């Protein structure tokens, strides 16, 4: 055990985690030149395309120093705020962390957030200044920021470059010197923490674990504590670029187990594995339950695909433990699922993965957050979607979730960033200067306001330089109303939103105008209305496509034309009674991008 080191890499988006991980894999000869490509651990097509890490990736490296051979278990983590749950799980399986900071950009919001996560778990932090080969690197300035943040000495900061490979040898040496070996008793009853899992269509569920105490052999009878299910350990092994089987594994090892589990819901991330005949006393305290921030409905375009969608969601949840879902039905869209996501990027990624990996065509409803509704009878309900809102006469007050947001930006963009937050009903809590050029703003903001397009706007007004991180601070009373969209008097429940009273009128107006552009013209007029309760606040009309029935009348009495027009009017009236309006998929998506 003394020769094992478990560590993860934490940083803000695009500070060079995956590139530095590539250099370490090449340096330790874990992968050959033939398998080498950029972001070698990011094996999802989406990750390659967007250049971001979505999943944490674990891999074992062998390294020799002073005649001793060491096993280094590396976990590369995502940097985006939406995937912080992945980071927290990786941190639970490690004893140390490499904190990577871009020498050109300095410390950003997500760096601080991930660092605090690591410090809560008492990890040993190794600060690394990356991208030192760039001409615009500012090593002295950024070093001062790091010293202020974690209180280390200047000589402890390693200068590195993922592109050129500079500093890789020094990082590996520092990992062995500074990061403690895993603590654990190889002779105690087996205790292993599941920190991730994937679904393989041939072998079933593959669970990734870290052994805290004890040892495990192939063909052992094991039990998953949270579900109480028992299995045979068909195959255990370590994680290299592929899966490498082993006959026995000891405390401190990180590896995988396959036991022919076919049902995705039988494996829970954060669960404990132990032996059936010699179980451990208690389960390992895993990580906190995931708290979804954004809720949206996902429905199959074809109602017959409902079961396929359920299977796809089960398998996705296995691969992404931060996704939560439960069945729901809608009058307009049929049967589907109400899903909870950690943020808008997370929602977009899930939608794309459903389409690419499982070939599912889905409609996603307007995203919203959960509200607490206090009723006049004294009871409280939690409402996730507008159609679940009780009758307005029964409601006493509605509370909405608020977040404490930390925004780090250059001092020149402070004005526009403040205006954006104040427009979103935010209140400024504090403003502090980290250096002469960089300031941190802390705001209280309603979560419902930032769900739509806050992050995109923040990036555009700060030319990409502002970084944003948040956590939920609690619920506060708010003046919310339910805005409904009616087509020819029929409510479309998938387009309903809960919105603050002050924003309802302009939002309803914009929604009607947008739908007018997107709904195709029919043989009859279509009235598009926005309503709050029984009060209509905006209306647009899609005019009917009309055939010129009077074209054959040339000359003659006006009554001949009038007779034909009256006949047409009767037909239109009858058609309007029986005609229904299809809302195209584009309309649902356009509502999300109203600005």
Image: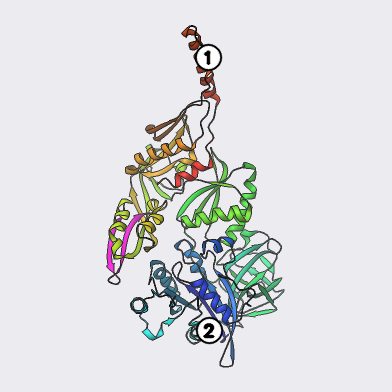
Q: Earlier in the sequence, mark 1 or mark 2?
A: 2
**Count of numbered circles on the image:** 2
Quadrant assignment for the N terminus: bottom right
Specify start and end residues of the magenta stretch as a single range: 425-446
Residue appearing at x 29%, y 72% in the figure: 435
Few, some or many residues within 10 Å of mark 2 (<14, 14–19, 20+): some
The quarter holding residue 299 reads top right
Magenta span includes 283: no
Residue 403 in the figure: left or right of residue 525: left
Assign a secondary structure to mark 1: helix
Residue 432, labelled with which disc?
A: none
Q: Which residue is mark 2?
A: 181
Disc 2 is placed on an element classified as: loop
| x, y percent for residue 135 | 40, 75
x, y (%) of residue 359?
63, 51
Q: Residue at x 41, y 82 (%)?
A: 157
């Amino acid at each position: 055990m003394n020769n094992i080191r478990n560590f993860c890499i934490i940083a803000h988006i695009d500070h060079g985690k995956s590139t530095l991980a590539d250099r370490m894999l090449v340096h330790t000869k874990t992968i050959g030149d033939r398998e080498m490509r950029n972001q070698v651990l990011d094996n999802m097509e989406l990750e390659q395309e967007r250049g971001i890490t979505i999943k944490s990736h674990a891999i074992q490296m062998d390294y020799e120093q002073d005649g001793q051979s060491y096993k280094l278990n590396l976990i590369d983590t995502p940097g985006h705020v939406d995937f912080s749950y992945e980071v927290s799980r990786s941190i639970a399986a490690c004893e140390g962390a490499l904190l990577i900071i871009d020498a050109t950009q300095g410390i950003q919001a997500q760096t601080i957030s991930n660092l605090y996560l690591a410090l809560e778990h008492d990890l040993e932090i190794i600060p690394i200044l990356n991208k030192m080969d760039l001409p615009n690197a500012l090593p002295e300035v950024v070093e001062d920021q790091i010293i202020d943040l974690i209180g280390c000495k200047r000589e402890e900061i390693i200068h590195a470059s993922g592109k050129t490979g500079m500093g890789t040898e020094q990082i590996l040496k520092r990992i062995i010197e500074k990061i403690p070996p895993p603590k654990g008793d190889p002779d105690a009853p087996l205790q292993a923490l599941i920190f991730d899992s994937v679904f393989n269509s041939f072998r079933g569920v593959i669970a990734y674990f870290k052994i805290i105490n004890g040892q495990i052999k192939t063909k052992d009878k094991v039990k998953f504590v949270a579900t109480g299910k028992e299995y045979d350990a068909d195959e255990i092994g370590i994680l290299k670029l592929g899966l490498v089987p082993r006959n026995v594994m000891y405390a401190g090892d990180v590896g995988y187990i396959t036991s022919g589990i076919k049902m995705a819901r039988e494996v829970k991330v954060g669960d404990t594995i132990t032996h059936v005949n010699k179980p451990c006393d208690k389960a390992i305290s895993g990580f906190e339950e995931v708290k979804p921030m954004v809720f949206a409905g996902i429905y199959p375009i074809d109602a017959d695909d409902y079961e396929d969608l359920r299977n796809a969601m089960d398998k996705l949840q296995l691969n992404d433990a931060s996704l939560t879902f439960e069945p729901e039905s809608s009058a307009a869209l049929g049967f589907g699922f109400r899903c909870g996501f950690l943020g808008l990027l997370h929602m977009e990624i899930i939608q794309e993965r459903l389409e690419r990996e499982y070939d599912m065509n889905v409609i996603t409803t307007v995203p919203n957050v959960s509200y607490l509704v206090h009723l006049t009878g004294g009871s409280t309900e939690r409402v996730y979607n507008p159609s679940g809102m009780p009758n307005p006469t029964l409601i006493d007050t509605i509370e909405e979730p608020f977040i404490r947001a930390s925004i780090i930006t250059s001092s020149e963009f402070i004005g526009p960033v403040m205006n954006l937050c104040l427009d979103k009903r935010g209140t400024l809590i504090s403003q502090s200067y980290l250096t002469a050029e960089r300031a941190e703003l802390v705001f209280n903001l309603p979560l419902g306001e930032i769900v739509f397009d806050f992050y995109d706007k923040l990036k555009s007004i700060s030319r990409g330089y502002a970084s944003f991180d948040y956590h939920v601070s609690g619920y506060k009373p708010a003046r919310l109303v339910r805005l409904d969209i009616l087509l020819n008097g029929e409510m479309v429940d998938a387009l309903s939103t809960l919105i603050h009273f002050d924003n309802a009128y302009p939002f309803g107006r914009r929604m009607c105008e947008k739908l007018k552009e997107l709904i195709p013209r029919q043989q009859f007029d279509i009235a598009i209305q926005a309503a709050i309760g029984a009060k209509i606040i905006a209306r647009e009309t899609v005019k009917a496509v009309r055939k010129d029935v009077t074209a054959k009348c040339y000359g003659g009495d006006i009554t001949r034309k009038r007779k034909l027009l009256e006949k047409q009017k009767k037909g239109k009236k009858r058609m309007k009674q029986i005609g229904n309006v299809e809302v195209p998929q584009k309309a649902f998506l356009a509502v999300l991008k109203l600005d």
